[in-house]
Image (cartoon, rainbow, N blue to C red):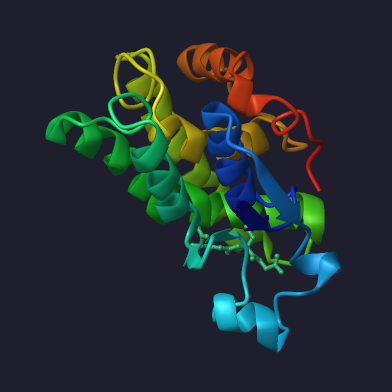
Amino acid sequence: MLTLWGRTNSLNVQKVLMCLNELRLPFVRHDAGMQFGVVKTDDYMAMNPNSNVPTLQDGDFTLWESNVIVRYLASQHAAGSLWPLEARQRAEAERWMDWQQTVHNPSLTTVFWNLVRSPGTIGEKEFAAACERTERAMDILDARMGQTKWLGGDHFTIADCALAPGVHRYLHLPMERKARAHVQRWYEAVLQRDGAKDILLLPLS
Ligand SMILES: N[C@@H](CCC(=O)N[C@@H](CS)C(=O)NCC(=O)O)C(=O)O
C-alpha cells in the first residue's frame, strides 16, 4: 500500500496527488506540514530529515522530493506513457520538471506567500523583483505551450503533473495578470484530466 504524507494545499503534495490520480493508484494520505505539524517529530524526520512534505512510503521504501516521487510512480506504473521510454522524450519532460523547481517555483513562492499566506511581509522591491521573475517564467511557459500540446510533447507526462499545481496557483493569485492564451489552453486541458479532480479545484491557502 502507498502512503502519502502531506497537506493538500502544498503545491509539492499536489503534484504527487495528480500523479496518483492519473495512475488510479490506491493510497492513504496523512495530513502533515504547516498547521498539521507532524514534520518535526522524530518519527517523521526518520522518514524525511528535511521536515518537509511530501513523503511517500511504498511498503518498506520511503521517498521524498516531489518530482522524484512523481518519476518513481510513473516509471513503475506508466512506462511508455506518463513516463516516456524514449530518452529524448523523457529528457524533454524532465527538463520542465527541473525548470519548475529551479526557475518557476522560487519566485512564485515569494509572490504567493506575500499575497496569500503572510501578506505584506517582504519589501516592495523584493516583491516587484519576484513578480518580474514569475512573469518571465510564465512567458517561457507560454512560448512552450504555443509549440506543443503538452509540456513534454504530444502526450500528457510527468512534466504536466509537476507544473500544473504551480500554474494553478499562479492563475489564482489575487493580482492582475496578463492573458497567456497558450498557458490557458493547456491549463483548461489539464483540468479535464482525472489527475486534476479534487486537487486543482482547491482554493489557495
Ligand atoms: N524540493 C522539495 C520541497 C518540499 C517543500 O518545500 N515542501 C513544503 C510544502 S510545498 C513544506 O514541506 N513546507 C513546510 C511545511 O509544510 O510544514 C520537494 O519538491 O518535495
Tell me the quarter of the picture where residue 156 sits. top left
Relative vertical location of residue 47 with respect to residue 68 in this rendering, above or below? below
Residue at point 61% right, 31% down?
Answer: 21
Which x, y percent locates residue 86? Answer: 15, 30
Foreground residue among 193 and 167: 193
Q: Residue at x 31, y 26 (%)?
A: 152
Q: For this view, does 50 lie left or right of residue 203?
A: left
Q: Quadrant of residue 3?
A: bottom right
Question: Between residues 27 and 45, which one lies in front from this camera angle?
Answer: 27
In the rendered structure, the answer to whether residue 37 lies left or right of residue 160 reads right
Q: Residue pushed farthest left?
A: 87
Percent coordinates x, y for residue 9 in the rendering: 74, 48
Q: Residue furthest right?
A: 35
Residue 133 percent across, percent down from the top left:
47, 47
Residue 119 in sight: no
* Quarter of the rendered structure image containing ligand 1: bottom right
Q: Residue at x 71, y 34 (%)?
A: 199
Q: In which quarter of the view is residue 194 placed?
A: top right
Query: Which of the pair 92/195 is nearer the observer?
Result: 195
Is 80 situated above or below 114?
Answer: above
Name above or below for residue 100 compared with residue 188: below
